[in-house]
Amino acid sequence: MFTSALRAHDGALLHFVNHDPVSWVDPEQFGRGIAAGTHRREWVWLAFADEGASEPLARAVWWGPVGSVHPVELRCLLVHPSVPHPEVWAAALIRSGHRAFAEAGAILAPDLVVEVAAARRDHPAVERALAWRRLAAEQAGLPVVTERMLPAGNPARAEGALVTRGAEPGGAADEFLRVTYSARPLGAPSRPALAGAGR
């Protein structure tokens, strides 16, 4: 079962832990985002094994600037490590969110954004974490991958900077690699419309 988050889901949503060495939205950041309006419950989607389950198997947390009507980035895509083929669950979760956003009037498909500590880019655990997210993004209609280095203190990380597991303060680990999965090349004038937009 795939559903947007309700207040009743807050406990399970906030206790979902990132097991991969990539960026994610932690409970403190989510709380600040809810207060500011950059995270919203209707922009959070959860996957449950069945309708009666209390603990989600996957979650997706989208983000938008303050005052935005629709989200612009998927900043946290997590699947419980016990789940085989995480890309299948993640892709279905993204598609569920995209359909809901389109029905609410969104025209553009939000990018999936993942940050990793640049010094660990070639670490096997990072490679695995990026690999299944890339498969999920492709299956959900976000096939274009762009990698961009963000030096320490870069303004691109200033607003709502993501929490990145495996990154340590000081030294080369302060540099981050931002991996973006998009429906179009970065810099292109427009993105394909979400399925169902304009109904």
Image (tube, rainbow, N blue to C red):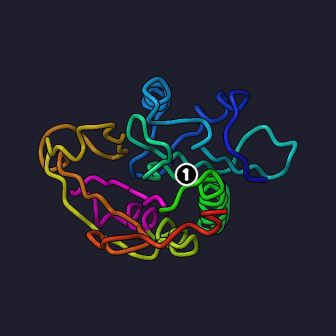
Residue at image mark 1: 78
Amino acid, disc 1 = Leu
Q: Residue at x 36, y 40 (%)?
A: 163
Q: Is residue 51 above or below residue 188?
A: above
Q: Residue furthest right?
A: 52
Relative horizontal placement of residue 52, taking residue 153 as reference (left or right) = right
Choose between 190 and 82: the one closer to the eye: 190
Q: In which quadrant of the rendered view does residue 146 lie? A: bottom left
Q: Residue 88: x and y, percent?
A: 65, 68
Magenta span covers which residues? 109-130
Q: Residue 132: x and y, percent?
A: 51, 68
Q: Residue at x 19, y 59 (%)?
A: 149
Q: Is residue 163 above or below residue 35?
A: below
Q: Is residue 198 above or below residue 76?
A: below
Does the magenta-highlighted stretch encompass residue 111?
yes
Q: Residue furthest front?
A: 198
Q: Residues within 10 Å of mark 1 (few under 14, many from 20)?
A: many
Secondary structure beneath label 1: strand
Q: Residue at x 52, y 53 (%)?
A: 77
Does the magenta-highlighted stretch encompass residue 56?
no
Q: Residue 56: x and y, percent?
A: 70, 44
Choose between 122 and 50: the one closer to the eye: 50
Q: Residue 29: x and y, percent?
A: 42, 31
